[in-house]
Each structure stands twice: as structure tokens, then as C-alpha cells.
Image (spheres, rainbow, N blue to C red):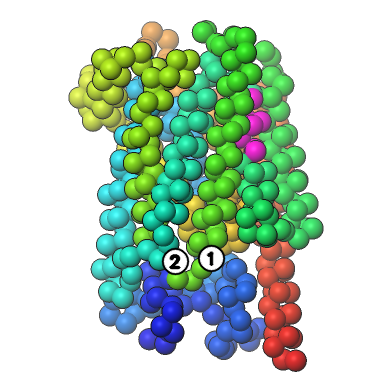
């Protein structure tokens, strides 16, 4: 067992790890001011019974990146089906609220599993509850604003596709303002190319490539046609701040990631519950009174737990969505903790939109003729829009890989500079 100073808790990350740099000859030498560099060369995880497992940071980064893409794709795919079956009354608040309740058993369960695997693991967070409550509020605000504004009647799919890329811009800006951390020129260029690749892959939605879509029945008009896209855009502003604050805390070695995550999600659920009044706001929520609010909540609850034969398929979609949502949130914290940081997170998440769009060129969740609710069914639809998505992905994938490569080069250069300064 490695020695630690009195100021350093024994469990700074999930499953208790000890970060140290690896020299070119792969020998394990004591770190030289390793805390000044965000990403370590390897992580050692300690388990019950004195067992341990060491993994290089690059391999861990790849694993977390793949899991992030898979979990976000599962969310992307399952949410439309869930909305098609649950959203009879066009009320999105029940889905947000019931989803947030599942975070507590999932994440606090992980905390206690971690404690079982490693008895020395911390179960108390070193981060103040005021800050974790703020992060929960930012998370809840992002969910409320984006989900309400994402109704196609309020913000068209083309605008949503374009405005969602603002999460990258907000994260880069707030990372510089809050952390005073920029990115090297090469990675900044990569970030710009990612935005270009996203724009190309989203051109079918932005410019209606392949024909003008039919008008959405009941779509908003007048000033609200401008207000709702602005609300959708502003929903990504708290997400940008959230990503950066998470990076700031998780890059501190004393922060126990799972405990930190569990508390943030608890405060998120509390804030979502306290936002119930948003469902009563005219032109915003879907409930005009207490009875209607109760009816919507009860209907969604029955759909999610096989209690209403009219929407039996909702439970399966809800299970997949909850699992994917929990895993996606877990990956947010782990990829920020062990990888390059918040910008890498949003760039990886950017791959999900074109990949999800390609999925829906093969499958559909639209209700088949004569049926009220949608279900997944094979419905390949190859057109010019698919070509744009392929081209976008051909740009995005290698650019994200190069971003990670240039980040690794910057980190090694920083380490060499530190070692040179220490030597002098």
C-alpha cells in the first residue's frame, strides 16, 4: 500500500487508484510534479484482498470513449420511442422527473459496491455540498430548458441540430474563463474542424436536403417561433458551466468521483422535483391545473411500469433509456476524470448525432399505418441526406482522434518541461 500525506484522502477516484508517470522504459519511477499535468500515464486500481489492476491512460481513454458513445447512442435511440408511447398529453415533465429518481439507487449503489470492493474507499465527498447543489441545479436547468424546447412544435429539428453544437462552444469558453485553461493551436483547429464536420452532417436537417418536410401540426407562430429556439440554445449554457466545474473538481486527486457524482445527481433530482411549477407556466408547460398535472403524472407512471395496456411498449423503452442515461452520466464523470477533460467529452458526444441519424436511416420509430404508438421496425431509407452524414463522420472521427493525439503530445511536452526545470 502506497503512503499518502495526511492531506490526501485514501480514495481519490473510483476503485482507489494511484497515478504515476511512466518513463520511456516503462519503469515505475516516482512522479515528478505529476499533479501539474491533467492526464497520468497509467492508473492503478486497488481491490479487496490486496489485488490491483494497472491500465495505461490511453487504453482507459479508449474504453471510456467507446462506452460514452454507446451509452449516448442508446439514449438517442430509445428516447423517441419513449416519447411516442408516454407523451399522450404532450407533457415532458413526468419523463424528466421519473428518470431523475433512478439516479439515486444507481449511483449510491455504485458507491457502496466500490466500498465493498475496496474497504479503504471514501464514502464522504471532499467537495462542498453547496457546490454539488449548484451542479445539480445546473444539470436540472439544462434538462428542463432543453427538453421543453425540444418539442418539434416549438423548435424545428433543423434548428435543434444546429443549436445543439453550442455545447462545444460554451464548454471551450467557460473552460477558459473559469479554469484559465485554453487548448493548443492544433487542438483548437481540431475543435473548429469538428464543428465543420457537424455542420456538414447536419446539413440535411438545416437546409432540408432531400425535400421540404411537411409542416408540424400545431407549430408555434409569431414571437414564440423565435423565443423557443433561444430557450433551447440557453439550455446548453448551464451544461457548458457544468462540464467545466466537473473538470475542475475531478482533476483534484482528493475528489472521490463516485461519491461526488452520486451527490450531484441527488441534488439534480431534488431540483427537478422543485421545478414542478414549470409545468404550469402558460405557453411553457402542459398542465393547466392540478387535476391535469396529476392525470399526466399518473399516465406516465402507469406507462413506465406496465400498468396501462395502451402503452405497454413504454416500459421496455423506459428501461433501456434509464440504463443508458445512468451510464451516460457516469461516463461524463469518468471521462472528465481520467481523460483530457471537458472539451474532449463534448467532442466525443458530438459523434453521437450523426451516428444516431445513420441508425434512423435503417430503423424507424414512427407508428406503422393503423397504429397509434410507434415501435422500432426495419425501414431503410437511403437518400442524399445519408451521404452528408457519411461525409460528416469521415471528417469527425479522424479529427477527434487527432485531437486526442495532439493532447497527448502537449502533455508529454509539459512533462518534459517540468523535468527539465526540476533538473536545473
Q: Quadrant of the N terminus?
A: bottom left
Which x, y percent locates residue 291? 26, 15
Boundaries of the magenta span? 159-166
Q: Which image quadrant for residue 233?
A: top right
Q: Which image quadrant for residue 376?
A: top left
Choose between 115 and 364: the one closer to the eye.
Answer: 115
Q: Which residue is at a point 48% across and 25% down the rendered structure image?
A: 148
**Pointer 1 local density, CA inside 10 Å: few below 14, some 14–19, many at least 20:** many
- Name of the residue lying farthest toward the bottom: 424
Residue underneath mark 1? 251
Q: Which residue is at a point 71% across and 28% down the rendered structure image?
A: 203
Q: Is residue 46 left or right of residue 400?
A: left
Q: Which image quadrant for residue 92?
A: top left
239 over 375 or under it: above or below:
below
Which x, y percent locates residue 163? 64, 31
Which x, y percent locates residue 108? 30, 55
Q: Quadrant of the C terminus?
A: bottom right
Choose between 50 and 146: the one closer to the eye.
Answer: 146
Amino acid at each position: 500500500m502506497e503512503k499518502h500525506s495526511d492531506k490526501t484522502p485514501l480514495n481519490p477516484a473510483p476503485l482507489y487508484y494511484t497515478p504515476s508517470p511512466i518513463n520511456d522504459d516503462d519503469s515505475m519511477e516516482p512522479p515528478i510534479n505529476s499533479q501539474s499535468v491533467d492526464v497520468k500515464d497509467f492508473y492503478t486500481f486497488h481491490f479487496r484482498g490486496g489485488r490491483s489492476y494497472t491500465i495505461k491512460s490511453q487504453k482507459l481513454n479508449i474504453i471510456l470513449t467507446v462506452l460514452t458513445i454507446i451509452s449516448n447512442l442508446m439514449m438517442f435511440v430509445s428516447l423517441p420511442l419513449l416519447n411516442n408511447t408516454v407523451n399522450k398529453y404532450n407533457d415532458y415533465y413526468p419523463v424528466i422527473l421519473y428518470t431523475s429518481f433512478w439516479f439515486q439507487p444507481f449511483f449510491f449503489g455504485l458507491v457502496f459496491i466500490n466500498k465493498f470492493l475496496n474497504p479503504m474507499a471514501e464514502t464522504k465527498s471532499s467537495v462542498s455540498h453547496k457546490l454539488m447543489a449548484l451542479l445539480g441545479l445546473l444539470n436540472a436547468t439544462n434538462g428542463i430548458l432543453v427538453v421543453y424546447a425540444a418539442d418539434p412544435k416549438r423548435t424545428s429539428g433543423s434548428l435543434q441540430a444546429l443549436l445543439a453544437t453550442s455545447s462545444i462552444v460554451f464548454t471551450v469558453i467557460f473552460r477558459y474563463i473559469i479554469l484559465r485553461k485554453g487548448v493548443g493551436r492544433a487542438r483548437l483547429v481540431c475543435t473548429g474542424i469538428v464543428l465543420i464536420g457537424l455542420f456538414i452532417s447536419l446539413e440535411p436537417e438545416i437546409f432540408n436536403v432531400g425535400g421540404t418536410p411537411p409542416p408540424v401540426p400545431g407549430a408555434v407562430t409569431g414571437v414564440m417561433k423565435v423565443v423557443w429556439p433561444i430557450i433551447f440554445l440557453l439550455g446548453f449554457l448551464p451544461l457548458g458551466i457544468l462540464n467545466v466545474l466537473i473538470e475542475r473538481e475531478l482533476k483534484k486527486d482528493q475528489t472521490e468521483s463516485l461519491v461526488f457524482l452520486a451527490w450531484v445527481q441527488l441534488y439534480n433530482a431534488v431540483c427537478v422535483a422543485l421545478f414542478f411549477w414549470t409545468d404550469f407556466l402558460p405557453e411553457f408547460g402542459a398542465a393547466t391545473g392540478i387535476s391535469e398535472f396529476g392525470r399526466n403524472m399518473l399516465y406516465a407512471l402507469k406507462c413506465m411500469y406496465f400498468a396501462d395496456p395502451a402503452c405497454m411498449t413504454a416500459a421496455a423503452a423506459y428501461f433501456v433509456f434509464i440504463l443508458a442515461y445512468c451510464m451516460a452520466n457516469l461516463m461524463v464523470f469518468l471521462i472528465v476524470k481520467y481523460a483530457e477533460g471537458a472539451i474532449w467529452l463534448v467532442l466525443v458526444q458530438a459523434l453521437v448525432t450523426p451516428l444516431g441519424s445513420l441508425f434512423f436511416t435503417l430503423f424507424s420509430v414512427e407508428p406503422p399505418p393503423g397504429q397509434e404508438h410507434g415501435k422500432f421496425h426495419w425501414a431503410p431509407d437511403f437518400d442524399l441526406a445519408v451521404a452528408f452524414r457519411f461525409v460528416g463522420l469521415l471528417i469527425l472521427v479522424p479529427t477527434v482522434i487527432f485531437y486526442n493525439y495532439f493532447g497527448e503530445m502537449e502533455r508529454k511536452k509539459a512533462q518534459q518541461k517540468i523535468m527539465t526545470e526540476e533538473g536545473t
